[in-house]
Image (cartoon, rainbow, N blue to C red):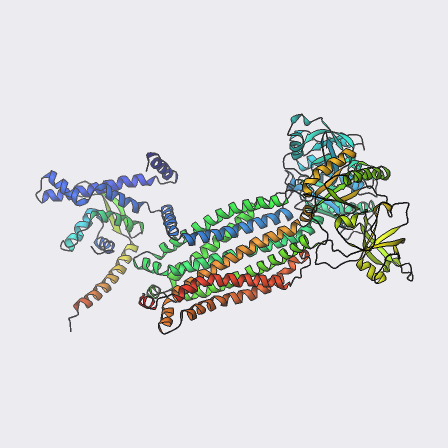
Amino acid sequence: MSTIARRLLASLRLAMGWRRISEEEREMRAELLDHLDRSTEKNIRAGMSPDAARRAAVVAFGGVEQIAEAARDELRSRPLDDLMRDLSYGVRTLRRAPAFAAIAIATLALGVAATVTVFSFVDAIYLRALDVPNGGRLVRVYLDHIGVGALGYDGFRLVRQRVPAFDEVVAHYSTAPLYTRAGELTGELSGAVVSASYFSALGIRPALGRFFTAAEDAVPDRDFIAVIGYDMWQRWFGGDRAVIGRSLSINGLAFTIIGVAPERFGGVLPYDAANELWIPMMQQRVGYRWCDGFKHDCQVLDVMARLAPGATLAQARSQVSVIAPQLLALTEIKNPPGGVTVERASGVPERNRREKDSLARLLSVIGLTLLVIACANLAGLLLARGVAREREMAVRTSLGASRQRIVRQLLAESLIIALAGAAAGTVVATWAARLLVGYFSSDGEGHMRHFNVSPDVHWLVLAVALVVATTLMFGLFPALATARADQGQRLRGGRGANVSARARLMLVATQTGFSLALLIGAALLARSVDRIMSGAELDSSHMAMLRLRPRLVKYDSARAEAFLHRVFDRIRAMPEVTGLAYARGVGLVWGSTGTVRVVKPTDAPVPPDRQMRVSYHEVSPGYFAAFRVPVLRGREFTDHDDVGSPRVAVVNETLARRLWSGNAVGESVELSDTTFQVVGVVRDYRPHHSGEEAAPMAFVPFWQNVFEAQVDARLAVRVKGDPAVAIGPLRRAIAEVDAAVPVSEAMSMRNQVDDRYADLRLGRAMLIVAGGLALLLTAIGLYGVLAFLIERREREIGVRLAVGASPSSVAALIVAQAMRPIRIGALAGLATALAGSRLLSSWLYGVSQTDIASYAFGLGATVIVAAFASFVPARRAARVDPATALRAD
Amino acid sequence: MLYGTLDMLILKALQLEPMHGWGITERIQQWSESVLQVNQGSLYPALYRLKRQGWIGSEWRTTENNRRARYYALTAAGRKQLAAEHRDWQRLARAIDLVMGMSPA
């Protein structure tokens, strides 16, 4: 040991209050020298010369230093020293069993990581307050009514005047599409229209410049100022500090940048819409286009507030309830079921929660299941090891080790495993959380979301406590057995072993059940994803999607039409383009424009509420050709089907069959009281996945402007090469026609589908990983218990072989034994999967909850892996040499 | 010396009166008619061990010719321990005696 290390150790000892050591050492030395003196005196009395007497005494004594050293060892045995010694002994023991240690630690790490990751995620969605300084004091105030819960501008003013429990009241519209241009750069940004109180209520400070003042947010349409997000500052302006004072075009109007929001701040709906740009409430007409937010019949603005110091949520609720009738009177909604709600601004807002509900629930179940499996596996491992060491313990006891000592030793070993596992689990959890964040950090178009799903300390502590408790509990098993059983019995290997074998078989059954359930769930979701990705009967290969939004920059329909026609001509002329479809749609391009009522004019009149409703689509000429949907009879729309020509429609097979039992071409149909001539019938296609029923559909020409004049359009462009590559040239072509018109949602159709089903794919990925891990752990558990059983039954197997049993029958015996817990576990697993698949029901597209193939897959995988895990021990059993086995012990 | 018996012998040596380490070796040697020689290298570690287990206590005293020495004395727990170890020893010794006393038939 180097001098430095020695000094370090010495100072460590001092620090730990071992000052007495030096005193005791001095006394010890005095005592030893005294002893030496007495020996010398005795020798002199016996007639030796003083020198010789001294020498003889020293020789007999054997060296003061060695004795002092040995005595010191005894002296040092204080609790902490004992612990250190136990720990270092434990490390050595574990290093002699590296496979056990590695599996145990990995199992623990998995359990900790799964629990922490999953619950941190759920916590972030449901429980975590907004990640801003005043997050804990913020509340949301809204009408409990799906879709239209905003209190609006008048409501905001009323709350501001009449609720003293709030010291700041905020109005915000946080889902404003702001089409922004700065020089060459353009893009549709997720913006927010906010009152000047927004920033101070949240308690954030600008990274650069300043935020809006109350004076700048007092008069409608006067102050054209904007705050940009940190990411946008970096991305658009390279973090240039001279950005303050620069001009931005937002939805066609010039705004001046006055500040940059702090890093990682994405507004108050970070999950739903991470904002990158903020404009004052008084500019809400820029942010919202469908009605005037200052009028009382147009509720755009949502209300948030900050609780005043000392004010409680209950006080705020009672004060709000007093003005609730007035708030309701300001809105169109007459009787919202829950009146006016005041809730803490934690997690995802209630109205966005429902869509995340099933994901959160599924993830929780996966996390808990993995924790249970991990604990079961760990318990099995520790039990096996305990039994294997029973003899070691017995030997140590007979050699004089006290029971307390053995318990301490085992505890130390367990502690090492638990701490190593917890540490590894924490690392994995951090990493997994980062993966999850990555999954949610941007939407399909690459807009950043700042969603804090970093591991939560509370859950970390809980998970670590849980696995440490499990480890210590099962790690103590051998010590408890030592306490119980009589020594001789244990030396022979007795009852404890059988109890443990049974316990371990039960543990294997438990693991089998849970891993089977996870596997079945994984198979169900995998098949569901498969149906969606490959099953939709719209050809998504080589399709690039774009959305043109002239409405955002306030084009009227005439100007928009001229623009759109020039864009379409331009695109059709591009060499890589092989087809162009466009439509008016509310969702994705293959979604419908809406629903219409359908009647045959030749039928007896039917009251509107009894009429059949079908989805209808306002589609372009060449729409079916571009999507490769065959036209079975008649024709599809052409450029001539416009406002001036007779109204025409195309129907799909199902609608044709329902109304005319076959050929519909030439017939008349009434769609929401307007009469159309059917000119074509297209083959049924299922837009989302092959599992859905073919639904009746009606199509009308985009340019006949039947229900409303066209302004915006969604495009699907079929190209020769990679659609993602084609996006750039397409955008440029559009910009050449008119750079002022926003282009958004530009991505390949595949990408759009992926984004739409992100939750489903995440659920699938998690289930597949969890199922695989669970199966692996189960296999390890099964292998362990079988190997152990065979070792215990080696004599019995030897006897069987000696009296003539064939090796294959012995192997069969082992496999049969292995299959017993597998059978029990599989039954339990099937039942669990049946009950648990309800969790997945909202995600099962074209796959039944009781899908035979998925259950067969899960069962098959489990049985194959179980057979594999039992094969190796079984073969070893078959190869037992009877002579050796019988001679053993 | 037989493994595990040193502790018992030390306790026994202290049964009558407190003694210092050297005295213990002398007494054991004397009582065993010089058959048992306590190795000093194991005596002191054993003393500290017994002390830590609470079976003996110690204090510094001034001796006959004005020298200071550490005296060890049995505690109550030490007395009990001595009795227990003595019983075990008697059983074992009798057992060995019985075996060794068997005359070949």
Q: Is residue B93 above or below residue A593?
A: below
Single out the residue that lies furthest toward the front.
A575
Residue A426 horizontal side relative to residue A620, left or right? left
Q: Position of residue A795 (x, y in %)?
A: 36, 68
Residue at image location 32% in from the left, 38% down from the top? A1
Residue A121 horizontal side relative to residue A293, left or right? left
Query: Which is nearer the eye, A458 or A354?
Result: A354
Q: Quadrant of the C terminus of chain A?
A: bottom left
Q: Position of residue A859 (x, y in %)?
A: 56, 63
Single out the residue that lies furthest toward the left.
A47
Q: Quadrant of residue A497?
A: bottom left
Any part of residue A194 in sight = no
Any part of residue A863 in sight = yes
Q: How many marks?
A: 0
Query: Which is nearer the eye, A177 or A182?
Result: A182
Q: Quadrant of residue A242?
A: top right
Query: Which is nearer the eye, B79 or A24?
Result: A24
Q: Position of residue A849 (x, y in %)?
A: 65, 61
Residue A10 horizontal side relative to residue A163, left or right? left
Q: Position of residue A80 (x, y in %)?
A: 38, 46
